[in-house]
Each structure stands twice: as structure tokens, then as C-alpha cells.
Image (tube, rainbow, N blue to C red):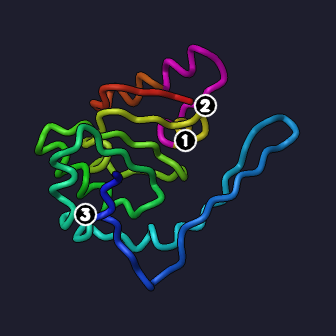
């Protein structure tokens, strides 16, 4: 009983893929090929507006173009829908997007890239979280 009416098919690219490796210290590296996900446009999002308006949450990762995420989050915010961003794969984020996030879920590497604060202990993790809170993001979960 999953609603698939908002799935978009494209011939522009193949299905996106991600490959995860783990080093001897247990740290992972993820290699991502965005594929078809990276063809998503703000217009695609607008065509799915009804699904966003009727949702409780809109969750996004950076495996789709940032303009599409901004479009989805703008619609969500206008209708009281909570926005959640997992900023992976890590990259700098425009203020336009940061201002639309209710909940952010970065890992330590992504948090450092966005805040400039390396997570090395509990205090640096709190400093990192406070950075995101200072931007107006209501909830920070650093994994």
C-alpha cells in the first residue's frame, strides 16, 4: 500500500548508487554516484506539492540537487511541515537552505565541514551543535 504516484522516471541517467568502505580503524568512506537523483528539478518538486503539503515531515539528503531541496523545504515550511536534512554527501550549504531546516542530522565529518569545528570530544560536539542552533535550526543530531 505504498503510494508510488510521485515517483519520476528518467532516461537522462541511470539509478544512483553508493558504495561504502570501512578502514582498519572502523571509519567509513562513502562513494556516491548521484545518477538519476541528480536530474531532479524544482519543477519536479512543485509537481509533487500535494504530497509535501500532506506530509508530517520532509526528509532530504544531498543526493538530489540543492535547488530541488530548497523548493521542497519552502513548500513544507509554508504549510507547517517539519523539514529534516541529512547533509550527505557533505558539501557547503547556501544560507537559503540553512534557513529552511528544522532538524539537521550530520555525521561528525559533515558537521565539521559545515561549522568549521572539528568534533574531537563532548565539548566540541556541543560547540558544533550550538553553531547549528545559532543558525535557527531547532534540533541538531550529530551521528
Q: Residue at x 59, y 33 (%)?
A: 108
Q: Is residue 40 above or below residue 99?
A: below
Q: Position of residue 91 (x, y in %)?
A: 50, 53
Q: Is residue 22 magenta?
A: no
Q: Residue at x 73, y 43 (%)?
A: 28
Q: Residue at x 57, y 20 (%)?
A: 124
Residue most extreme to the right: 24
- Per the picture, the main secondary structure of the magenta-coloured stretch is helix
> Mark 1 falls on what kind of element?
helix
Of callouts 2 and 3, the N-terminal one: 3
Callouts 2 and 3 close, C-beta under 8 Å = no
Instruction: State the separation of the CA atoms marked 2 and 3.
Output: 34 Å
The circle drawn on residue 45 is: 3
> Mark 2 falls on what kind of element?
loop
Q: Is residue 132 above or below residue 36?
A: above
Instruction: State the separation of the CA atoms marked 1 and 3.
Output: 25 Å
Mark 2, Cα crowd under 10 Å, few <14 / some 14-19 / many 20+, is some
Q: Which corner quadrant of the image does residue 4 belong to? A: bottom left
Q: Position of residue 96 (x, y in %)?
A: 26, 50
Q: Nearer the viewer, residue 42 or 6?
A: 6
Of callouts 1 and 2, the N-terminal one: 1
Q: Is residue 30 left or right of residue 48?
A: right
Magenta-highlighted residues: 114-128
Mark 3, Cα crowd under 10 Å, few <14 / some 14-19 / many 20+, is many
Mark 1, Cα crowd under 10 Å, few <14 / some 14-19 / many 20+, is many
Instruction: State the separation of the CA atoms marked 1 and 2.
Output: 10 Å
Kindly identify which residue carries mark 2. 118
Q: Position of residue 18 (x, y in %)?
A: 63, 59
The circle drawn on residue 110 is: 1
Residue most extreme to the left: 78
Q: Is residue 4 above or below residue 107?
A: below
Amino acid at each position: 500500500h505504498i503510494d508510488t504516484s510521485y515517483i519520476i522516471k528518467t532516461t537522462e541517467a541511470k539509478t544512483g548508487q553508493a558504495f561504502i568502505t570501512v578502514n582498519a580503524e572502523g571509519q567509513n568512506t562513502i562513494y556516491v554516484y548521484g545518477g538519476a537523483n541528480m536530474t531532479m528539478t524544482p519543477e519536479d518538486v512543485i509537481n509533487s506539492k500535494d504530497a509535501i503539503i500532506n506530509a508530517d515531515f520532509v526528509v532530504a539528503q544531498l543526493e538530489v540537487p540543492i535547488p530541488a531541496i530548497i523548493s521542497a523545504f519552502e513548500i513544507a515550511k509554508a504549510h507547517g511541515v517539519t523539514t529534516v536534512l541529512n547533509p550527505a554527501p557533505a558539501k557547503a550549504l547556501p544560507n537559503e537552505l540553512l534557513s529552511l531546516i528544522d532538524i539537521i542530522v550530520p555525521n561528525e565529518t559533515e558537521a565539521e565541514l559545515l561549522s568549521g569545528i572539528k568534533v574531537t570530544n563532548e565539548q566540541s560536539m556541543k560547540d558544533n551543535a550550538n553553531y547549528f542552533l545559532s543558525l535557527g535550526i531547532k534540533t541538531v543530531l550529530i551521528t
